[in-house]
Amino acid sequence: MASLVRLLLLIIPLGLNLAASSITTANDQFIYSGFGGSNLIVDDTATVTPDGLVELTNGTAYLKGHAFHPAPFRLHDSVSGNGTVRSFSVAFVFGIVSVYPDFSAHGMAFVMAPRTNFSDALPAKYLGLTNVQNDGNSSNHIFAVELDTIQSVEFKDMNANHVGIDINGLQSLRAYNAGYYYDDKSGGGGFQSLKLISREAMQVWVDYHGEKKEINVTLAPLGVAKPGTPLLSATYDLSAVLADLVYLGFSAATGRVNSRHCVLGWSFGVDKQAPAIDITKLPKLPRAGPKPRSSKVLIIVLPIATATFVLGLGGALVLVVRKRSRYAELREDWEVEFGPHRFSYKDLFRATDGFRDKHLLGAGGFGRVYRGVLETSKLEVAVKKVSHESRQGMKEFISEITSIGRIRHRNLVQLLGYCRRKGELLLVYAYMPNGSLDKHLYDNGEDGRRPTLSWAQRFQIIRDVAAGLVYLHERWEKVVIHRDIKASNVLLDKGMNGQLGDFGLARLYDHGTDSQTTHVVGTMGYLAPELVRTGRASPPTDVFAFGIFLLEVACGQRPIKEKAQGEQIALVDWVLEHWLNGTIMETVDARLRGEYDVDKVELVLALGLMCSHPLANARPSIGQVMRYLTGVTPLPELTPTDVLALMQNKGLAASDLSYPDLVSSFGGTISSLSGGR
Ligand SMILES: Nc1ncnc2c1ncn2[C@@H]1O[C@H](COP(=O)(O)OP(=O)(O)OP(=O)(O)O)[C@@H](O)[C@H]1O
Ligand SMILES: *[C@@H]1O[C@H](CO)[C@@H](O)[C@H](O)[C@H]1NC(C)=O
Ligand SMILES: *[C@@H]1O[C@H](CO)[C@@H](O)[C@H](O)[C@H]1NC(C)=O
Ligand SMILES: *[C@@H]1O[C@H](CO)[C@@H](O)[C@H](O)[C@H]1NC(C)=O
Ligand SMILES: *[C@@H]1O[C@H](CO)[C@@H](O)[C@H](O)[C@H]1NC(C)=O
Ligand SMILES: *[C@@H]1O[C@H](CO)[C@@H](O)[C@H](O)[C@H]1NC(C)=O
């Protein structure tokens, strides 16, 4: 029945409005049925697509976008001179397309404001409207209707799917669940909820009565006539809120999740109803995911999918039973608050083709890593399966990784979320197409033809990793210790930029351990002496590992170097030996064939030695390291005391703490976690 009504609604205006142009505008009204050829004022992120859709956000995280009707309106009554805002009416059609079906960030709003420049506004929960300083300030002169898809406690949001009336700030004057009131023929009626992020277009009406100071907001699915009862109704005098000249437009913002907020059509009228939007002329919403597939695919896939569905129904019972165990997950009450970061096992299973070996990217000390493509968003991900028997510390750990999940930096591999099963934790990361740095340093590829990284590339990667670490140690809201810096944890993105991966993961093995079973987490050869002694990680222990990493990249040698006859020597000691002999350049990776910047190589080697100083407080901070690398501060000479300390450490490392001893003294923990590679 509903679809019949919808069909009729589609057909009727088609006959009547064939000749109407898609944009008409006058002093007291305008109508856009699609935005092709319009000259909206849009800012950097917002675009009008060739088929006439306004995309306020383009599918990138932490962005805001705006679009405004080019001319402002004077809404204050000039005839009477008493300055009352006249009645007006707005209608618009919008759609929110998130990469995830059940989660979207952050929302959008219809806005009336004295300006079109919102460069000072913030994305995420501020919806691109206000910022920390000016939210709620009456000098904003903003009236907005928010379509909010995240619950922000700060703004007393009721839930993650509501519509609100906002005056000058994001704490709504009035708000209610997205949905609409309907009447049925028998005289009854009810409330039908709608999901703002359903990826379906919906229509909103905003009506203001100038004399009664009444604001009504009404929502309905596209094709359903305007419901008689508004979703929200408030009495508020907009005369003091709206400025003399008012721009009308839209604002939207993304957060950690990249969603597209779209406007398909829009109309406005002063002292009259907003003209009806011709829904037959509206552009289509984009498909979910970064690469929209052609509709041809749909034509082929749809019948197949339908057939599969029908066939599947038969076997459904069998499957349900099997699925229970196959996709079984572990969920506990405390996880509710981390909900948005939680992936379903099923999605991950599908994304990786059932964790087939074909998709195996590699295996590390923590578990195997699989490449996958998320079905709905077509996002490429790397899924790390970590076996974890103990539940101890799991809550803290999940809370930590989800907080870490909010960390976004171009030199840190992004953690997208997690999933938990019995004895198993799955971590979902952004996929890095060029793999890990160690492969590029030590492995010439299956055909022996992987090109050697040039010095320029290596130096860039070094600086990238340093920048990522500066962020973790000094810029993020709290100090995050990486604990496992090494070449195999440096991943390379499409442009061969270095991104530090795995941060915080080592923490998993730190929780719930007591002194008797101290696990030294980290990797042999990168462990600072005090870390081996106390088992306590700190920013200086990260700097130590970074120092070894510097040497590794410049020398193209693993931190524990094989000498002749299977004898092992620490890379630091070998470099130091050459340093003292004045033959430091002999340590530089021979595969560079002498093509490098001598000064920079020297800088990196000396800095490597300095960072791997045995005394923690003699090491520079990562911020200092960054200043040396960028040449802001010249590198100080290694003092004789430094050299002496390094040499003494050498003696220690060679005799007392040789590699096999270390392994046995920690009961094999090191080797089972990450040693031997
Ligand atoms: N985000 C990613 N994108 C692409 N490949 C990845 C990604 N994460 C890991 N890999 C690949 O999977 C391999 C194994 O990764 P993993 O981090 O488990 O091992 P590791 O770094 O060698 O050791 P550890 O677990 O001790 O840190 C890496 O060497 C890398 O090639
Ligand atoms: C989205 O807009 C931002 C800001 O203008 C830009 O940096 C980014 O590349 C855009 N992304 C896409 C997918 O167009
Ligand atoms: C303002 O003027 C309008 C039009 O004359 C009138 O209807 C309205 O009552 C006036 N409002 C006030 C507050 O005086
Ligand atoms: C917007 O305002 C900022 C200052 O608040 C200014 O720097 C910027 O140039 C303005 N942008 C436009 C497009 O006018
Ligand atoms: C509101 O903004 C005005 C102008 O920017 C500023 O002077 C005033 O201090 C602000 N008020 C509050 C309460 O922040
Ligand atoms: C708001 O809705 C109420 C209830 O349906 C209606 O009586 C009133 O006229 C509406 N006001 C406006 C401004 O549309």
Image (spheres, helix red, strand yellow):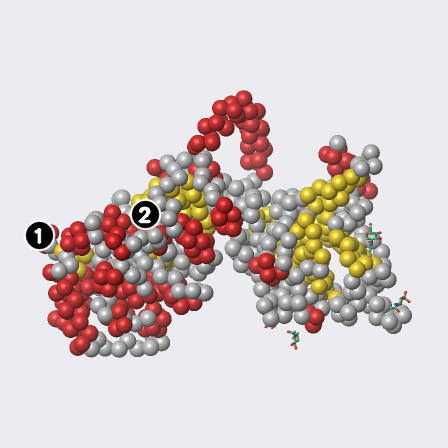
Q: Secondary structure at mark 1?
A: helix
Residue nearer the viewer, 493 or 141: 141
Q: How many marks?
A: 2
Q: Amino acid at mark 1?
A: Gln
Residue drawn where x is 44% and y is 47% of the image: 418
Mark 2 or mark 1, whichever is nearer to me: 2
Secondary structure beneath dot 2 equals loop
Q: Residue at x 47, y 44 (%)?
A: 332
Residue neighbourhood size for the residue with mark 1, other residues' Cα within 10 Å, grouped as few (<14), some (14–19), many (≥20): few
Q: Which residue is farthest top?
A: 314
**Numbered mark located on residue 565 in the image:** 1
Residue under pointer 2: 366
Category of crowding for the residue at label 2, using alpha-carbon neighbours closer than 10 angstroms: few (below 14), some (14–19), many (at least 20)? some
Check if mark 2's residue and mark 1's residue have beta carbons within 8 Å.
no
Quarter residue 223 falls in: top right
Sequence order check, earlier mark of 2 and 1: 2
Q: Is mark 2 within 8 Å of ligand 1?
A: yes
